[in-house]
Image (cartoon, grey):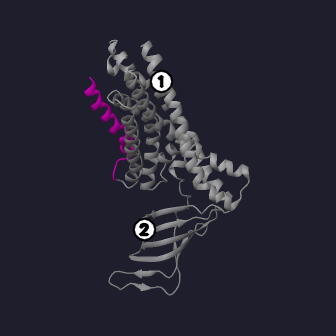
Amino acid sequence: MPILTRTVLGEIARWYLAGVALFLILLMTDALSSTVGKLLIYHPPVIKAVAAFLSILPQNLNKTLVLAVPFSILLAFSRMQRDNELKAILASGIRPLSLVWPLAIPFALVGVLAYFNASTLVPAGLANWDRSWYSIYDMAPPPPQQEKYTYAPPEALYYAGRVNSDSGGGQVAQLDGVMVQRRGETLTAQFGTWDTGKQTWTLSNPWITRPGQNPQRSSGDVVVPQNDALRPPPPAAQQVSNAELRAALTGNTLSRKGVRDYTFQLAARIADPVTPIVFALAAGMLGLLIRNRAAAFAAVLVFIVCFYVLWTTMPGLAGAGALNPTLAAWIPNLAFLLLAGGLAWRLR
C-alpha cells in the first residue's frame, strides 16, 4: 500500500489537477465566446458583466470535477504502463484489483464537494444567470407561466393550456387555450382572462357546445365563476435548492410533469456526486488493460461521450414519464457500474 499511495495516487492527483484546469478553462471559454458578442452590443458595466459570467461557474465546476476523473486515471495508468511502473508494482505481488479499489476513497471526497456545490451554489448561480442577463438587456423578466392548468371542482372542469401571470403579482392573468365544462355545456376559447379578485374567468368569444346541438360562437365575452387561487408557477427545478425541492414535492402545488422534474432533479443531485466514484472504478480497471497513450485518449473520449449522451437524455425521458425519475437519474451510474463489473471480472 505505501507503493500504491506514493506512486499511483500521486500520479493520478497530478493528472486530475491538470484535467480540472483544462476542462474548466474549456467550459468557461465556451461560455465566454457565446456571450461576448452580446456584451459588446449592450455595453453593461464591468461588474455586472463579470457577475453574469461567474454565475455559470458552479455548474461548470461540477461538470469538470466529473470529467477530470477518467482523464486523470486513464492517462496516469497509460504513462505508468509505458514506463513499466505498473508492471513492477504488479510483479511485487499486488493484485490488479487492489490498485483500483483504493481510488474510490479520494474521489469520494470529490463527490462530497460536488454534492455541496450541486445542492447550493449551482441552483443559486443558474437563477442569478437569468436575472443578470435580463438586467443586461434592460428588460423585465417574462411573466411567470403555468402550462396545462387544470381545476376540477364538483360537476365542472376548468382547463387552460397556458396561464400567464402578472410579473408584478397582480390579480389578473392571461389565459391561452381555454376550456370550461359546466352544467352540461362546454365552452372553448383561444384567449381569456382570470381575475382572482372577482373570482371569474372571462372567455373571449367562446364556442359553446351543448348536447344535441351544433357548436355556436358567442357574440361577446362570457364570464364564468372560478374560485381557485392563482398561484405562481414553480421555478425551474435546476434553480431550486434541495430543501425547496423537498418542500414542493410534499405539497400539492406541482403538476404531474412538475413532480417528475422535481423528483428527477432531487435524485440527480445525489446520483451525480456518486459519478466520480463510479468513474474511478471503471476507468481504473480499464486503465490496467490499456497499453499506450493513444488508446488512453480514445478511452477518455468514449467515456465522456457515452456518459454525456446518457446524462443529457435522461431528464427528457423522466419529464415525459417514459422512465421513473429516480431510476432515470441513476441510469448513467448504473451503466458504468456494469462496465466496471465486466472489467473486474476480466481482471480477476
Q: Is residue 59 visible?
A: no
Mark on residue 11?
1
Tag 2 residue: 157
Quadrant location of residue 35?
A: bottom right
Locate residue 241, reporting x and y percent.
55, 43
Tell which residue pokes out farthest to the front in this image: 83
Q: Secondary structure at mark 1?
A: helix
Please tell me which residue lies in front, 317 or 161. Answer: 317
| Amino acid type shown at disc 2 | Leu
Q: Is residue 30 visible?
A: yes
Please tell me which residue lies in front, 286 or 340. Answer: 286
Whether residues under marks 1 and 2 lie with C-beta atoms below 8 angstroms apart, the answer is no
Task: Judge from the rendering whether residue 265 lies leftward or rightward of residue 51; answer left or right.
Answer: left
Above-or-below relation of 7 to 120: above
Q: Residue at x 57, y 46 (%)?
A: 28
Quadrant location of residue 268?
A: top left
Locate residue 30, reporting x and y percent.
55, 50
Few, some or many residues within 10 Å of mark 1 (<14, 14–19, 20+): some
Q: Residue at x 57, y 40 (%)?
A: 120
The reply to whether the magenta stretch includes residue 114 is no
Q: Nearer the viewer, mark 1 or mark 2?
A: 1
N-terminal of the pair, mark 1 or mark 2, is 1
Q: Main secondary structure of the magenta part?
A: helix
Q: Which residues are magenta?
A: 322-348
Please identify the quadrant where the N terminus is shown: top left
